[in-house]
Image (cartoon, rainbow, N blue to C red):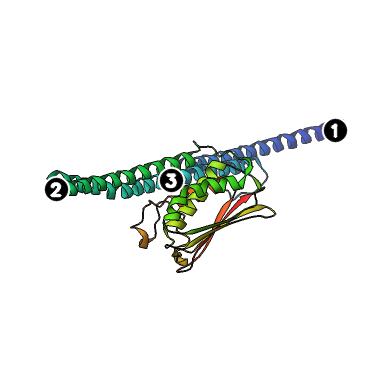
């Protein structure tokens, strides 16, 4: 009986010691976890990288993993905000640069107009002022289109329709200018090809590419449009015999407000190709370009079937 009692006392003693040690270890682990979490929270508040080196399968590691993911989300959002600010600053700078010249010209012609008595010279000044106002109007309209597309104000509405009709819409916009320069237009498009696309905005994109082709193709040149339905995409090829684009600049032509140094005497603000790529990409497609100086350029538009 005494031995049994001693064994019971011993077991209870060991159990108490075990519980005390376990409580101490638990308290120490909790305090360590709290210290680590506090340090990580301070880092998170300060925008610094959270420590994620502990890969154990314990409570702290799980919380640390979530804090690390939260840090990455915040970092991504912060980078997006910085990128948006940079884009906005770039846009403001571009608009300022684009409007500076026509406004300066209007002021100059207006000063000449006020000091000039000759009727013919006054009429010439008025025509020049009108031309600069038209340029500003074109710029503003292009900026509105660009802004509405980028912000999603304009929705791309894809629906099955004949691609031939979309091409006709685009060609209609450049036909007179092409005819004046005696540029030969050729079109090869199946008359029964139905494609799921936004007719209005796809027509705008193709028009912008054709308009560039007409501007930079010499009198008597040619523009060829070819359409082929492939397995995944329908390929619209626009080939001109224009001045061509140097290889080093081909990656820049789709940038907003970019214009070739040699063509600043031509009408335009450098938004057409930018808008074209934006419109096509919003429909899940893309544009490629091949060009050789003195030979011409080929733009290949790919729209998903």
Rendering quarter of residue 188: bottom right
In the visual, does 195 lie left or right of 6? left
Q: Rounded to the nearest whole Å, what is the CA distance between mark 2 and mark 3?
A: 55 Å
Q: Is residue 278 visible in the rendered structure shown here?
A: no
Observer-nearest residue: 269 or 40? 269
Could you tell me which residue is drawn at 18 percent across and 46 percent down? 122
Q: Secondary structure at mark 3?
A: helix
Please tell me which of labels 2 and 3 falls first in the chain. Answer: 3
Observer-nearest residue: 64 or 193? 193
Residue holding disc 3: 82
Q: Quadrant of the N terminus?
A: top right
Q: Secondary structure at mark 1?
A: helix
| Numbered disc in front, either 1 or 3 | 3
Q: Rounded to the nearest whole Å, what is the CA distance between mark 2 and mark 1?
A: 130 Å
Residue holding disc 1: 4
Residue holding disc 2: 118
């Amino acid at each position: 009986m005494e031995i049994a009692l001693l064994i019971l006392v011993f077991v209870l003693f060991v159990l108490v010691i075990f519980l005390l040690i376990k409580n101490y270890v638990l308290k120490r682990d909790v305090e360590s976890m709290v210290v680590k979490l506090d340090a990580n929270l301070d880092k998170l508040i300060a925008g610094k990288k959270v420590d994620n080196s502990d890969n154990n399968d314990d409570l702290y590691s799980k919380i640390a993993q979530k804090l690390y993911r939260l840090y990455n989300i915040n970092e991504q959002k912060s980078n997006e905000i910085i990128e948006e600010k940079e884009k906005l600053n770039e846009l403001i700078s571009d608009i300022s640069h684009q409007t500076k010249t026509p406004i300066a010209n209007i002021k100059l012609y207006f000063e000449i107009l006020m000091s000039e008595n000759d009727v013919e010279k006054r009429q010439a000044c008025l025509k020049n002022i009108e031309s600069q106002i038209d340029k500003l109007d074109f710029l503003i309209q292009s900026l509105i289109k660009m802004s509405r597309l980028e912000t999603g104000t304009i929705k791309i509405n894809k629906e099955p329709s004949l691609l031939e009709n979309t091409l006709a819409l685009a060609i209609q916009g450049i036909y007179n200018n092409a005819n004046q320069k005696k540029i030969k237009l050729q079109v090869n498009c199946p008359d029964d090809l139905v494609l799921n696309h936004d007719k209005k905005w796809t027509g705008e994109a193709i028009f912008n590419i054709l308009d560039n082709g007409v501007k930079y193709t010499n009198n008597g040149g040619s523009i060829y449009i070819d359409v082929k339905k492939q397995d995944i995409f329908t390929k619209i090829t626009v080939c001109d015999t224009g001045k061509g684009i140097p290889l080093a600049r081909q990656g820049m032509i789709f940038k907003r407000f970019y214009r070739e140094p040699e063509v600043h005497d031509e009408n335009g603000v450098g938004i057409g190709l930018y808008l074209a790529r934006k419109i096509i990409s919003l429909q899940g497609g893309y544009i490629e370009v091949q060009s050789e100086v003195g030979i011409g350029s080929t733009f290949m538009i790919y729209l998903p079937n």
